Image (cartoon, rainbow, N blue to C red):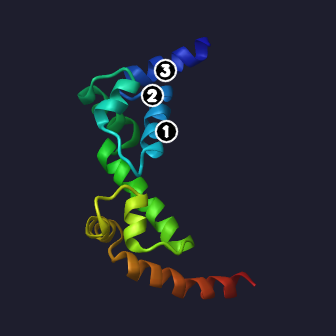
Amino acid sequence: MKAAQDSDQSSYSAGKLAAWQEAIAKQLMLANLDAGISVAEVAEACALSRSHFTRKFKESTCLTPHVWLRQQRVDKAMALLRHSPLSLTQIAMECGFFDQAHFCRVFARSQGMSPLAWKRQQADQAPELQRLAC
């Protein structure tokens, strides 16, 4: 118990979230990936003000909560593009994007190509990877 408190205290003094705060924040944001959750709600769950939480989250993860959440949404979208028959609109909704156009813009900015181009590229690489694995 003392070690955990010392660990939390050193994280606190370093300007980072305590381990429990970072875990709760990430868990809440991931659980609400499709529906969305406000930074204020996550901050409240971590017993911090919105601005203090945002500062500490960035110090802990090197990303703002908004950027971290967007990255998680794109990661989930890539998994769905790779492994599901869902349409782009369905993937957009499943990952918490406003609509398909928003999803395509964010994805292209993140990956340097449209979701469909990325999916085609993955499909083209799959046979090559299977051949190399044998």
Q: Secondary structure at mark 1?
A: helix
Q: Mark 2 Cα within 10 Å, few/some/many (few <14, many 20+)?
A: many
The residue depicted at 54 percent of the width and 71 percent of the height is 84
Q: Secondary structure at mark 2?
A: helix
| Total marks in image | 3
* Earlier sequence position, callout 3 versus callout 2: 3
Label 3 or label 2, whichever lies nearer to me, is 2
Q: Position of residue 38 (x, y in %)?
A: 30, 38
Residue 8 badge: 3
Q: Secondary structure at mark 3?
A: helix
| Image quadrant where residue 74 sits | bottom left
**Amino acid on which disc 2 is placed:** Gln
Q: CA distance from mark 2 to mark 1?
A: 10 Å
Quadrant occupied by the N terminus: top right
**Amino acid on which disc 3 is placed:** Asp
The residue depicted at 45 percent of the width and 28 percent of the height is 21
Q: Which residue is mark 1?
A: 27
In this rendering, is residue 38 above or below 34? above
Q: Which residue is mark 2?
A: 21
In this rendering, is residue 101 above or below 27? below
| Image quadrant where residue 54 sits | top left
The answer to the question of whether label 3 and label 2 lie on touching residues, with beta carbons closer than 8 A, is no
